[in-house]
Image (cartoon, rainbow, N blue to C red):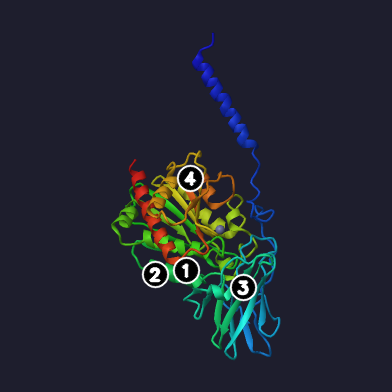
Amino acid sequence: MENPINTISSITVFLLILLLIGCSTSEEFSGYSYDPKDVTETSDKETNPHYTRVIGVNDGKIWVSNDFPGARMNDFYQVNDSLYRVAIKPERDAINNSPWYAFQIWSVEPDTIKLQLDYEHGDHRYIPKLSKDSRHWQRIDSTNYSADTTRGTATLTLNLERKPLWVSAQELFTWNDYKAWADSLTKKSFISQDTVGFSHNNHPIIKLNISETNTDEPRGVMIITGRLHPPEVTGALGTEAFINELASDTELAKKFRNNFEIWAYPFANPDGVQQGHWRYNARGVDLNRDWEHFKQPETRAIRNDLLPLKNDSLRKVYYGIDFHSTDENIFYPINREEKTFPDDFTYQWIDSLKKEFPEYPIEVEPFPPNSPITKNWIFHTFGADAVTYETSDEAPRDSMRTVTRESARIIMEQLIEEQKQ
Ligand SMILES: [Zn+2]
């Protein structure tokens, strides 16, 4: 008679084999539902030109310009006495629906006009933000704005004067803003700035090192990436708030920096941001689909900088966060069944965050780690837990910052606890 324990272990082995077969025959990832076809084929692509233009219409009375970093405006027309139209096109025809626009508009004489935003290969998405100096922004008053969801356009009522008005999908947060922020942080003795590589258009890929660890002792590492997708400004503001909290003078942040190093790459797609792209880098590639083949210099630079951590006897990667924006506040953790280190970490901090902000809308949607995105590469390479941290496009900026800073505090507390175990 067969030993019952052997029978049980044979069944276990059989089930394990079934599971492995199941995994190996699962279909290869080819893109999410909202991705264009072939998104994971990340070699250089041909892109549409975007010419720098200053255009005057109505006998030189109304003008627009796209002559600044982050701008996107392809053409400008007068439709009738009071209606004007801006034409906006993406950097490549096959693209996600994140139609970015940014331009200046002015009038030789004070005038009130209607302006239609008209998109090729996309439908209107972002509520316009207005600024008189490109630094202070306000969402357009709802009485001056209507979106036509059938046609995918939006019409704005604008009071124009000679001084240019900036109209943009989101606040502008471009190279100079990152540089000023990074430079102000590096005034602190425990923060340094590196260049880990260069984009296609020769922008540095910036890295911030934040740490007060003892160089001879073992310590943890937290990886942060941001702005792989150009229009995702609330994700950028979130990255800034999150890192500012890690770099703050609180007891908690100091304690954290005594035990952990922060390796942050907050501006991963500088070319896309500077060129006012909807999604891609300068060669028309979605950088958050290139974490398997690494065909783009931006992703390669970050990977090459991180890889030595694999065989570092003193540093252990504990966590990775990749900041993005979408139409809601949502976290994408790795499927709970996957064994990560620390295990179940993301689910625990999100629970704490939800308890502290019961009124603040926070969604959670676990994903299998089978796509070539940043978070999954961190998990597969280091075994560490990681999350895609998505902030709502229209999140009120102040409360978003408050919640993000609190999430940084919870993560620091939890990581310090994990390290003790
Ligand atoms: Zn994104």
Residue beneath disc 3:
72
User: Between 6 and 218, which is closer to the camera in this rendering?
Assistant: 6
Q: Are marks 2 and 1 in contact (CB under 8 Å)?
A: no
Residue beneath disc 2:
184
Q: Earlier in the sequence, mark 2 or mark 1?
A: 1
Residue 300 in the figure: left or right of residue 356 = right
Residue beneath disc 1:
178
Q: What is the x, y in percent for residue 215? A: 34, 52
Mark nearer the viewer, 3 or 4: 3
Q: Earlier in the sequence, mark 3 or mark 1?
A: 3
- Write the residue at 40% across / 52% down: 353
For the residues labelled 2 and 1, the Cα–Cα distance comes to 10 Å
* Image quadrant, ligand 1: bottom right
Residue 163 in the figure: left or right of residue 51 = left
Q: Earlier in the sequence, mark 4 or mark 1?
A: 1
Q: What is the x, y in percent for residue 211? A: 36, 57
Q: Secondary structure at mark 2?
A: helix
